[in-house]
Amino acid sequence: MPPLSQRCCQSASVRENGGVDRTNAGAEAGTGRTGLTGAAGVNLPVLRSHNTALVLDLLRTAGAEGISRLELAERTGLTPQAVSKITARLRDEGLATEAGRRASTGGKPPTVLRLVPEAGHAVGLHLDRDELRAVMVDLTGTVVGERRTSLDLGAGAEAVVDAVAEEAGALMVGASGAGSVLGVGIALPGPLDHNRGVLHRVTGFPEWDGFPLRDALARRLGGPVVVDKDTNAAALGLAVSGESGSFAYLHLATGLGAGLVIGGAVHRGARTGAGEFGHQVVQLDGPPCGCGGRGCVEALCLAAVAHGALDEAAHVLGTAAGNLVALLDIDLVLLGGRTITAAPDTFLRGVRTVLTERAERLGEDPVPVRLASGGVAEGAAQLVLARLFSPSRA
């Protein structure tokens, strides 16, 4: 399996909060060992400053049409001289290139710059309870490689780590010669400690409690790894792709959870445990849940789905969504997960009905409900990229 480029690993490692350390050399530095990889690497010290991240994010959002240095200065508040220095470094590192000139409005026509998407890549993996999906994306978040395989999350740490390493490695082969792989993002059911990359008692799989997944995979892959809940990764991907304000992403598949974006940033809570949406109790004498409680939304939803009662499952999901709207006063509810995408109209109708009834009682406008675009694996890749382009969102 090709490793992450040595230059990348020497200039960036995973911080305790799961981000990219832009000040300390990675564990592989000076050892002669290469880490996650492609041939031509991106020299990450150029990404150290917040100002550089601002410029990179604007280059990314400008797309193929590009953006001029003057526009970059106006939109960042930086001086033209500072922008010129930053963009010169980005061009030297292969991250930016000229994209022609704009029509002159008097004087010399301004040069337009654009991001070089293939200058770097990130790998994102979604570990569900029964399957694994992996993608590789370029710097714009465009998927350039994808793999899917069955997975048994209860097969034990060694088997799961082997499967992740195999799928990530197969994707990284495709990055050889086309820019380095900057890191790997892992998204899976919680609860877990995002800061340390340590799993807690994953619902239905208590044997994972205390397992240091981030560190185990970083050693295996030889480079930066970020671990987060599947719902948080999906929510981050949605925020990066343009969803604004405060919203909740509700994911129903083999389990039920929520990713929360408050004021444009993923909300994880003091112990990174926010979003355990599926384990709010809505029926005190309800059926037992895999978490050890009774009457949890997840248990009720999954039971209804198992019996083919999708309208009932949608109503229960809507009731829980109404609780969330009342608690957080969010702007939008987004639905995702394979159970929902298999019957989207049923779940959209059921959740909207409950939220509309609630709004009518209160004399308010109902909170909109839509299907989410993008997937969890794409969001997992953004766990890596967002810390380079938009650290405030991550």
Image (tube, rainbow, N blue to C red):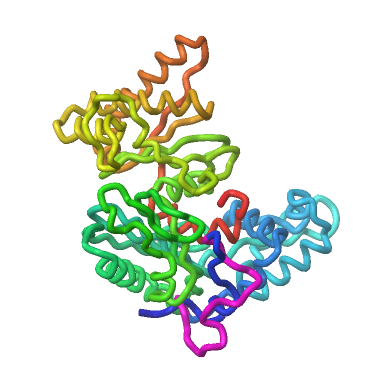
Q: Is residue 269 above or below residue 248?
A: below
Query: Could you say where residue 85 lies in the image, as x and y percent from the top left?
Result: 77, 68
Which percent across, then down, holds residue 212?
A: 40, 65
In the displayed structure, does residue 145 sit left or right of residue 331? Answer: left
Residue at point 83%, 57% (across, down): 79
Q: Is residue 123 visible?
A: yes
Name above or below for residue 201 compared with residue 183.
Answer: above
Task: Say left or right for 154 vs 184.
Answer: left
Asked if 370 appears above or below 265 in the picture, the reply is above
Instruction: Name the residue located 60 percent from the left edge and 54 percent from the top edge.
Output: 390
Magenta stretch encompasses residue 31: yes
Could you say which is closer to the camera, residue 45 or residue 75?
A: 45
Examine the image and state in which quarter residue 136 appears: bottom left
Residue at the far bottom: name it.
32
Instruction: Name the spot of residue 72 as percent of width and height, x first.
Output: 73, 54
- Residue 288 or residue 365, whichever sits in front: 288
Residue drawn at (41%, 16%), measured in percent from left and top? 356
Q: Which residues are magenta?
A: 18-38
